[in-house]
Amino acid sequence: MVETVADFLLDRLSQWGVQRIYGYPGDGINGILGALNRSKDRIQFVQTRHEEMAAFMACAHAKFTGQVGVCAATSGPGAIHLLNGLYDAKMDHQPVVAIVGQSARAAMGGDYQQEVDLISLFKDVARDYVQMALVPEQVRHLVDRAVRIARVERTVTCIILPNDVQQLDAVKEPPHKHATVHSSVGVCHPYVIPQDDDLRRAADILNSGNRVAMLVGAGALNASDEVVEIADALGAGVAKALLGKAVVPDDLPFVTGAIGLLGTKPSWDLMRECDTLLMVGTSFPYPEFLPKPGQARGIQIDIDGRMLGIRYATELNLIGDAAETLRVLLPYLQRKSDRSWRTHIEHEVADWWRVLEARAMNDANPVNPQRVFWELSPKLPDNCIVSSDSGSSANWYARDLKIRRGMMASLSGSLATMGPGVPYAIAAKFAFPSRVAIALVGDGAMQMNGINGLITIGKYWKEWTDPRLVVLVLNNRDLNQVTWEQRALAGDPRFAGSQSVPDFPYARYAEEIGLRGIRVDSPDQIADAWDRALSADRPAVVEAITDPDVPPLPPHITLEQAKNFAASVWSRDAGALGYITQTVKEAADRYLPSKK
Ligand SMILES: Cc1ncc(C[n+]2csc(CCOP(=O)(O)OP(=O)(O)O)c2C)c(N)n1
Ligand SMILES: [Mg+2]
């Protein structure tokens, strides 16, 4: 049989190591779907419920495996649906290739059915490479370049294939003549390290500091050992940007945890008190959580020179791979003999965990969401893969959940979009079918994508070696994160018309479609719910009826500020009593440990 362009496209992708494509069908890609059917022993097509979820899954595949993620969608509406997931990948620097159909060439330019100007549509998100194949001779280099550019630039690329082109006979090797392109598969990544002089300059700065802080992000995920060794040598505390949660485990005494609005007080204090800052693989954006200008001498290490020197006015900006750079830097460092700064940090961290425990154990109506996360930590299975959605769950994920060595964890960091929690967990199961995946999701996000994601889980879970995928839903009937932003940032009362989320029987629904469903409406059920979900013989939904009045407090709030906040909203918000009480309880917990 003669190979079509679409057959060859898949063949070439598989030469690049692609084994799975997440997508949704449509006649704009029928040629590709036919080819996928013919090559299903080499490339699996995973059918999602919505193209946005296919793009989230491709992004998560890249995040969890380090390999290129691939998604496919039909022309017009399907292509448009991909966009949000592609932006998630782009903004978190993940290599993703989108393959989209287009109207037949003969119809293009005729305002034809489903004809959208796809090159313009993808021009921003796939600005590093978006190309349409007009003739079969192009397809080889379009695939080679789309995959290679996605990988080396850690970005999104896009190949557009008119549907008639997909069905043409493949040209595997363009003729050896003028105006043809001769491309190949593969790319080897170099070790990237700074020059020796620059390493010495970095060491001078770090050696002369008395109070060194480290901030690590997603770029340091391959550098866990090196981060710990450097922190030990420097007597430093280590704070983590959201995407860097799995860089260092939370059970190390000098790890101050998350930074930022979702962060911890030890991270806040670390940044305010340090005299030297070493940032590795992070572009954490909020300046108010970093040292004040001039307070600390700063060094930044990033593989991407474009991301250097834009968050803190660093003195030295080093282009380099995180692990390799830290490894070659280490021999230049003098181990700090005065450990008082490190001891101070460790006391703060130990105190802070007691604060979080006290906050988690506060009564709430009916369930305190923090307690759901707090009780999950010791039960997290080894090597599990955790995803969180955007919403209040991201606060508890960032602050309360104790990640251990060997686990992976992610969410939508820079785009901070709602919707990826469940799709990320699904992609984790396809990439690592024998590891447990756990998605931590709000009810708003669940109603946006998660419920439909459960249908996909229902379709595929029997293929996974270990069927355990647990979805936690915080059923607070509220778009709670934004409710708190309305109160605290805009100074407005909760607008019920925009914030109320209709109730939905998540656990019952899970049972209805053949999964396990566990509903938790009192705190004494939490531990048992986790045990049951994590030992189930199938994917499970834990639906926790949580209290929307529990405030996702910024880390540095004082009891005084909490009282002022309470006083300022009291006169304007009829429903204020519940959350004011809860806020004051939470803020007061900060003072508990030191009282003990
Ligand atoms: C696609 C998208 N739409 C809107 C937002 C703004 N937003 C951020 S968090 C949030 C509320 C999430 O509500 P829910 O999923 O119920 O979680 P909760 O905060 O209640 O725990 C909203 C609306 C967003 N980040 N992404
Ligand atoms: Mg909610």
Image: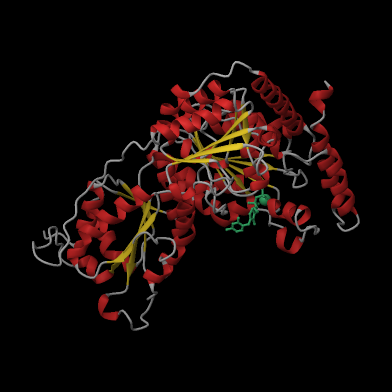
Say above or below: 17 vs 498: above
Quadrant housing residue 265: top right
**Quadrant of the image for the C terminus?**
top right
- Residue 570 visible in the picture: yes
Say above or below: 220 vs 309: above
- In the rendered view, how is the structure colored? secondary structure
Q: Residue furthest bottom?
A: 110
Q: x%, y% of residue 28?
A: 32, 68
Say above or below: 319 vs 74: above
Q: x%, y% of residue 369?
A: 70, 39
Which residue lies at the image location 72% right of the left edge and 31% below the top edge?
Answer: 356
Which residue lies at the image location 64% right of the left edge and 27% below the top edge?
Answer: 211
Say above or below: 303 vs 589: below
Q: Is residue 77 left or right of residue 561?
A: left
- Residue 466 visible in the picture: no
Which residue lies at the image location 21% right of the left edge and 64% below the top edge?
Answer: 138
**Quadrant of the image for the N terminus?**
bottom left
Along the viewing direction, whichever of 33 and 108 lies nearer the viewer:
108
Along the viewing direction, whichever of 363 and 55 lies nearer the viewer:
55
Q: Is residue 565 left or right of residue 20?
A: right
Quadrant housing residue 209: top right
Q: Is residue 419 left or right of residue 559?
A: left
Q: Residue furthest left?
A: 176
Q: x%, y% of residue 501?
A: 68, 56
Q: x%, y% of residue 225?
A: 46, 25
Along the viewing direction, whichever of 541 and 343 lies nearer the viewer:
343
Question: What number of labels is visible?
Answer: 0
